Every structure is written in C-alpha cells, then in structure tokens.
Image (spheres, grey):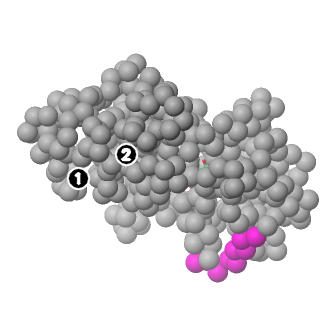
C-alpha cells in the first residue's frame, strides 16, 4: 500500500475530512481496497431487487486477522468480486442493511455493533472494530458520491476449507452502497401495501441462530416474497414455528387497536433497529405499545397495520390475505415522525 493511501484511510477512520486529491483517486491506488462498477453484485442474500442508475461499490479484503489500515490484501475487481460474494453466500454470510440520509448513515454505530454481535452468533469474529467499520462505511459513501443511499456491509468466511468445519477460514468484510429509492411503491406507502400469508414459518431458535441476520435465514424469505409477488402482493407476512404472527420477509410488523399499538415479541426473529426506533417514537407521543403473542385469528380485530425496516421505513399495510386494514392517524403520525427522525442532525436542528 502506498503511504499516502494509508494516511488517507487513517484520516477517514479518525473521522477527518479527506484531502481533495485523496477523494479523487486514492481508492484506486490503495491495494487493500478495490472498486468496481457493481450491478447488484453485492445483492447476495439481500432482499432488495433494484439498483437503478448503476452503482459503485468498494470492497475491503483483509489478510487473515488483518488490520484495515496496516495489512495488505488483494483488491477485488469486477467478476472476481461477484464470484467471491457468491461463494460467500454458501458460507456463513452475515449482512446488514443500512440507510444514509443526506450523507449520514442512520444509527451507523448501532448497525456496526449488530454486525459484530451477529457474527459472534455465527461463531466468528469480525477482524475490524466497530469504529473501523463505521469509518469504512462513510468512506465508501463519500467515494461513491452518494448521500441518500442504501449501505450494505457483508461479512463472510473465506473458501480455504471445503468441509463443514471452517475454523481456519479468513473472515472477509465488504461494503456496498446503492442509490436507493423507496423499497415499496411510494404511492402505496400510505395507501397501504398488500401482503400475502407466507407458507414458510420463522424457525424455532433451537434450530438456528434465528436472530442473526444471516444469509441462510433469507432463503425462506426470498421464496415467500417471490411467491407473494407472483400473486400480485408486495410482500408476505410470516408466522413463526408456533403459528404466531412474526414479521414480513424483510420488515417487522405492527397493528393498531383502540389507540394502542400491538406488535409480536421478537423472540425468534429480528428485533429491527427501525422497530425499536418506532416503538420509541410512539412512546414519546404517549401511544402505548404492547409487545406480545399475536395469533392470526386476532388480525380481524385490528384497525391499522404497518411494517418497519431500514428499507421499508414505516409503510402502511391495507391487507394481509383475507384481513383488511385502514391506514389512519397512528400510521401517518409514525411515518412522519420516522421521516423527521432519520434526517441528518444538522438538518433536524435547523428544521
Ligand atoms: N426482519 C427482517 C427479516 C429483515 O430483513 C429486516 C430488515 N433488515 C427487519 C426485520 C427490520 O430490521 P431493521 O429495522 O434493523 O432494518
């Protein structure tokens, strides 16, 4: 690695602005970071279909136990990167979807901490600190010149061992960013999207690390979402292994009854960062939020329904299979509050 590249990356990690010359070209010179013109190449294990307008991704590939700044590693380029990520899908891939608004990643550090935590559930340690991952995400965004974007770090085991045991594999991390429009049709976001009921269920945590955001857990999500889309629905509600209401294929779910919000207890599915944010926003508004067991036959008693997720944000639901909901005041209030909450701090203060 050239000394100048190392300095620039160190500046980025310390949160200092890059020198103008560095912004132009240092990613191409640094030999532990590669750029490639990705076309959904990083969408391995991800639940999102579009990549409009082309995108530029940056990969970080450390040597074993390597340090982002000090060690050298090979740059990933083009097909090679796509192949590496496809291989990664076969290994214990751990992903996170994050969102940047106005150049700032919402809950950036919380997402990086979750990446670490989730990797541990899959029995590996990510060889970068939370601060390094935070800095690398910001660097990729800055390098790609994107302000409103989806940010996707992925961590995976290398292919050094072909057996079930993977004790001596290298842990890799890559970060991709995309310009990101609305996950669901914007016109449907308040009107309400239509959900099918998935055939597959969220698994018993005794059978798999159910709360990890691991690619393996998305297999049933992808199948369920495809099936729903083929039938004209936007997404599908998944029950859990006990038959209780769980979540959608890439978002958490909430219901409203008599002015109170009800949502399933996240004991076998992802306790989303957006979910927690929205619960907090509702409580700040004095709206009671009850986390509990919800059975499908209770769906008929709820008046509103909405889903939450980094990609979905807060999106109203108008129907789930045979059940109907009317998006109304509480859904609208939380959509607005969430939109205000994700604004970059400077803008929020100025508003
Ligand atoms: N459940 C699943 C299966 C998801 O993929 C997501 C999206 N990451 C969520 C819930 C929502 O999580 P978050 O709010 O952290 O994006």
Q: Which residue is mark 1?
A: 13
Asked if disc 2 and disc 1 are in contact, CB closer than 8 Å, the reply is no
Residue 339 on image: x %, y %: 53, 59
Please state which of the two labelled residues, at mark 2 or mark 1, is closer to the viewer.
1
Q: State which tag comes first along the sequence, 2 or 1.
A: 1
Work out how far the residue at label 2 is from the one at label 1, CA to CA, in angstroms: 19 Å
Instruction: Say which quarter of the image contains residue 116.
Output: bottom left
Residue 327 on image: x %, y %: 76, 58
Q: Please tell me whether residue 44 is drawn above or below residue 262 in the rendered image.
A: above
- Say if disc 2 is inside 8 Å of ligand 1: no
Q: Residue furthest left?
A: 3
Q: Residue furthest top?
A: 79
Q: Nearer the viewer, residue 192 or 195?
A: 195
> Residue at position x 82%, y 49% from top?
320
Residue 63 on image: x %, y %: 27, 37
Left or right relative to 106: residue 28: left
Q: Please tell me whether residue 64 is drawn above or below residue 292 in the rendered image.
A: above
> Residue at position x 72%, y 34% from top?
223
Give the structural element (helix, strand or loop) at label 1: helix
Give the structural element (helix, strand or loop) at label 2: loop
Q: Please tell me whether residue 135 is drawn above or below residue 293 in the rendered image.
A: above
> Residue at position x 39%, y 39% from top?
168
**Magenta highlight range:** 284-292
Q: Which residue is mark 2?
A: 147
Q: Is residue 137 visible?
A: yes
Left or right relative to 307: residue 293: right
């Amino acid at each position: 690695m050239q000394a100048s590249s190392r300095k620039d990356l160190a500046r980025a990690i310390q949160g200092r602005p890059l020198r103008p010359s560095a912004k132009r070209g240092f990613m191409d010179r640094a030999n532990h970071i590669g750029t490639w013109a990705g076309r959904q190449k990083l969408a391995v294990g991800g639940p999102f279909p579009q990549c409009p307008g082309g995108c530029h991704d940056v990969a970080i590939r450390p040597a074993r136990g390597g340090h982002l700044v000090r060690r050298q590693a090979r740059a990933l380029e083009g097909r090679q990167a796509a192949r590496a990520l496809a291989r990664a899908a076969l290994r214990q891939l751990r992903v996170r979807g994050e969102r940047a608004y106005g150049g700032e990643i919402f809950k950036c550090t919380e997402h990086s901490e979750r990446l670490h935590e989730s990797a541990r559930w899959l029995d590996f340690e990510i060889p970068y600190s939370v601060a390094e991952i935070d800095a690398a995400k910001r660097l990729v965004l800055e390098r790609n010149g994107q302000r409103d974007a989806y940010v996707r770090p992925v961590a995976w085991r290398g292919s050094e061992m072909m057996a079930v045991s993977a004790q001596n594999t290298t842990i890799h991390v890559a970060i991709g960013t995309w310009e990101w429009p609305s996950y669901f049709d914007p016109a449907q976001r308040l009107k309400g999207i239509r959900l099918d009921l998935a055939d597959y269920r969220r698994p018993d945590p005794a059978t798999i690390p159910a709360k990890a955001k691991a690619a393996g857990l998305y297999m049933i999500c992808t199948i369920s979402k495809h099936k729903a889309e083929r039938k004209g629905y936007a997404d599908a509600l998944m029950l859990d292994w006990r038959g209780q209401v769980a979540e959608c294929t890439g978002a958490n779910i909430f219901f409203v009854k008599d002015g109170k919000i009800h949502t399933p207890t996240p004991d076998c599915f992802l306790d989303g960062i957006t979910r927690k944010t929205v619960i907090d926003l509702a409580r700040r508004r004095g709206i009671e939020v009850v986390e509990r067991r919800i059975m499908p036959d209770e769906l008929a008693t709820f008046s509103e329904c909405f889903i939450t997720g980094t990609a979905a944000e807060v999106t109203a639901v108008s129907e789930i299979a045979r059940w109907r909901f009317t998006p109304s005041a509480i859904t609208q209030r939380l959509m607005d509050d969430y939109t205000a909450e994700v604004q970059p701090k400077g803008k929020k203060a100025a508003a």
